[in-house]
Amino acid sequence: MEGWKLLLFHFYLNQVSFTLIVADPPTCPVNIGTQCGDGYDSGEWKGEFFPCIPKIKKYEDWMRFSVAFWHTFRGTGGDPFGAPTKMWPCEDGTNSLAMAKRRMRANFEFLEKLGVDRWCFHDRDIAPDGSTHESNSNLDEVVALAKELQGKKIRPLWGTAQLFMHPRYMHGGTTGPDLGVYAYAAAQVKKAMELGGENYVFWGGHEGYQTLLNTDMERELDHMARFFEASIAYKKKIGFSGTLLIKPKPKEPTKHQYDWDAATAANFLRKYGLIDEFKLNIECNHATLSGHSCHHELETARINGLLGNIDANTGDPQIGWDTDQFLMDIGEATLVMLSVVRNGGLAPRGFNFDAKLLRESTDVEDLFIAHVAGMDTLARGLRNVAKLIEAGKDDFELLEGKAMEWGEPEVLSAKQGVQIP
Ligand SMILES: [Mn+2]
């Protein structure tokens, strides 16, 4: 059953619970005996009693929220012109293993107090970097602690390998010229896929170019595709059931990133025969960097069967770069949720708050307020979508009223074939 045909929303906001049912036309008449199939008159029959009713999505099914570890626990408030402004409780500013463990405990306290049961991480943000062996053993220690703390409900929505911060990746992780770097990146992705996120995201921080004069673009894209093929093979080998996602971004830090936007990423996946193995993780601020609206990127992904995850953030139209702010615009949130509803939801993916506090926001409670406001904004967007759909039922009556009001339409020539002297 398509999301558009029958939508049932449950909201549990501000202790108010209501259900909105929109069914147009009615799709579930009572005389469905003929749909029960053979043998339904036997006592052993185990068929479906309500085959035309899908599982009803509750608020939490539409809104699978996730906290971004790197912004919330590694963000310092620093910018290219300003020193860090934030020092959260028990944070000593070091990259020690002991500090990594304290941050992980802070992460789980934050999730529990916020009532959010998913989080996202980069490997190098949760555990300190070192030699390959050291990095892996540091990760093992921190991940063991996370598994101990996560209980039955909390899970990582997705994980990723950070293939951009270390100087070794300055020419790219999978698209650079050095085979040693490529192998290092593969080792890092292999390990990150083994850590147990529900999904896995590729964001190519330095997969792009600064100038085509020293870049063989075709060869670099071939290398990236081969890297993805190897990741698919390894995913199958270890039985990783999550979705592989690509997060498009057009530029910054390089002047051209290979995953420019949703259409470019879709074309890349199609060209290399990878389209059935991937989905896209659309970030709203990256959409605006590419000159599109977030809604355009979500719809481009959706109509290509590629809408997977959303990094719910926003930029500032007057600043123009990737500011990763919390999405507070209800109009934009409505359009985001319209795509999500048309997509039938995002599960088993969701919304990651790839967003950070502004540099000037330095109190501990600001972390909570920002996340709550981000969730409320998208919830309001979902309510607006419900109203839009409900309003859609009245289209014929509305149009009839307009037809009466406007009278006979004027018929205008298209002026085709008219020669202009
Ligand atoms: Mn961003």
Image: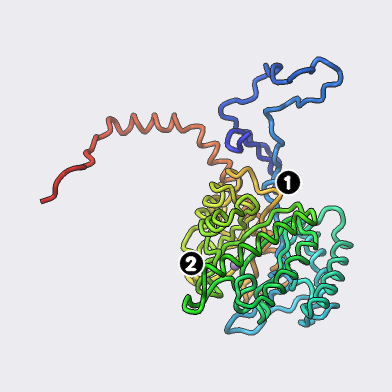
Kindly report the distance in space between the C-alpha atoms of the residues bearing marks 2 and 1: 35 Å
Q: Is residue 126 visible?
A: yes
Q: Which of the two discs, 2 and 1, labels the residue nearer the N terminus?
A: 1
Front position among marks 2 and 1: 2
Q: Which residue is mark 2?
A: 317
Q: Residue reaching furthest top? A: 41
- Seen from the viewer's position, the closer of residues 43 and 153 is 43
Question: Looking at the image, is 316 positioned above or below residue 178?
Answer: above
Report ligand 1 position as a quadrant: bottom right
Scheme by which the image is coloured = rainbow
Does the residue tagged 1 have its C-beta within 8 Å of any atom of ligand 1?
A: no
Q: Residue reaching furthest left? A: 421
- Seen from the viewer's position, the closer of residues 166 and 324 is 166
Residue under the image location 52 percent in, 56 percent down: 267
Q: Is residue 150 left or right of residue 242?
A: right
**Position in image of residue 230 (x %, y %):** 69, 61
Q: Is residue 365 visible?
A: no
For the N terminus, the quadrant is top right
Residue under the image location 55 percent in, 58 percent down: 268
Q: Which residue is mark 1?
A: 15
- Seen from the viewer's position, the closer of residues 152 and 34 is 34
Question: Looking at the image, is 342 positioned above or below residue 190?
Answer: above
Q: Are marks 2 and 1 in contact (CB under 8 Å)?
A: no
Check disc 2 and give the amino acid type. Pro
Residue under the image location 75 percent in, 55 percent down: 198
Label 1: state its secondary structure: loop
Check disc 1 and give the amino acid type. Gln
Q: Mark 1: few, some, or many residues within 10 Å (few <14, many ≥20)?
A: few
Q: Mark 2: few, some, or many residues within 10 Å (few <14, many ≥20)?
A: few
**Position in image of residue 31 (x %, y %):** 67, 16
Location of residue 329 by image quarter: bottom right
Residue under the image location 86 percent in, 61 percent down: 147
